[in-house]
Amino acid sequence: PELYASTKTINGQRGLEAISGKWICELEELLATLANDYSGTKTDLAIPSTVKYGIDYTVKYIGNNAFKNCSNITSVSIPYGVENIGEYAFSNCDELTSVDIPNSVDSIGKYAFNGCYRLASVHIPHSVTSIGEYAFTNCAYLAKVNLQSPVIISNGNLKDLFGTQVTEYIIDA
């Protein structure tokens, strides 16, 4: 089974939403990390590749708005196996300085990292075939973008994807 790395609140309890639509509310440590209003003391977010709840669920998607406005997060490690990063998934994580996007990700949703003010560089692996509009805009410190995907290069205006402040593009397609 697959799992969206996204949180919702029902009756005051946070839960992870599985593709089947079931709610999982007993994963306290994970939920503390994945909470939309992240207010813990942890700053390094490591999304797990699997979550056990009776059986193992493989994390394949980071849902829309999953970590939006989580201002304490400074780094994100996404495991190999995640295929999609949803719309607004990390938008306005203004303290985020680094993100590790694995070579399993094939799409990054629109505005996914918009407003990540302190993000200075990003590496887009060869596996990424689409990036939604304005995915990395309003990232004031984003100066360096390493692109390994020729599809993105041929199908998009780089300024619409990454903003006007980028001073260095490394294209290694």
Image (cartoon, rainbow, N blue to C red):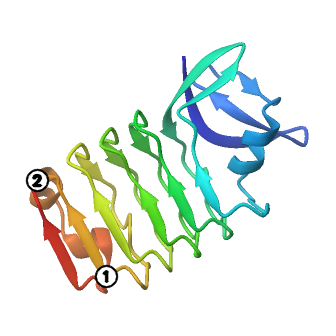
Depth check: give the residue in front, 138 or 49: 49
Q: For mark 2, does the 10 Å Cα neighbourhood hold few (<14), some (14 to 19), or many (20 or more) residues?
A: some
User: Where residue 71 sits: x, y (%)?
Assistant: 66, 70
Residue behind mark 2: 150
Find residue 83 and report its image quarter. top left
User: Where residue 30 sits: x, y (%)?
Assistant: 72, 40
User: Where residue 17 sits: x, y (%)?
Assistant: 66, 31
Q: Is residue 45 left or right of residue 146?
A: right
Tell me the residue at 24%/76% (across/down): 159
Q: Is residue 106 left or right of residue 95?
A: left
* Numbered disc in front, either 2 or 1: 1
Work out which residue is located at the far right of the displayed protein and give it: 11
The kind of residue on which mark 2 rests is Pro
Residue behind mark 1: 143
Quarter of the figure that contains the N terminus: top right
Instruction: Measure how far apart labels 2 and 1 are at the Cα level.
Output: 20 Å
User: Where residue 154 sits: x, y (%)?
Assistant: 9, 58
Quarter of the figure that contains the C terminus: bottom left
Q: State whether residue 73 is above or below residue 80.
A: below
Q: State whether residue 20 is above or below residue 111.
A: above
Asked whether disc 2 touches disc 1, contact meaning CB atoms under 8 Å apart, the reply is no
Tell me the residue at 83%/29% (across/down): 26
Depth check: give the residue in front, 33 or 154: 33
Q: Is residue 113 visible?
A: no
Q: Is residue 77 visible?
A: yes
The kind of residue on which mark 1 rests is Ala
- Secondary structure, mark 1, is loop
Q: Is residue 28 left or right of residue 56?
A: right
Whichever of labels 2 and 1 marks the residue nearer the N terminus, that label is: 1
Depth check: give the residue in front, 41 or 136: 41
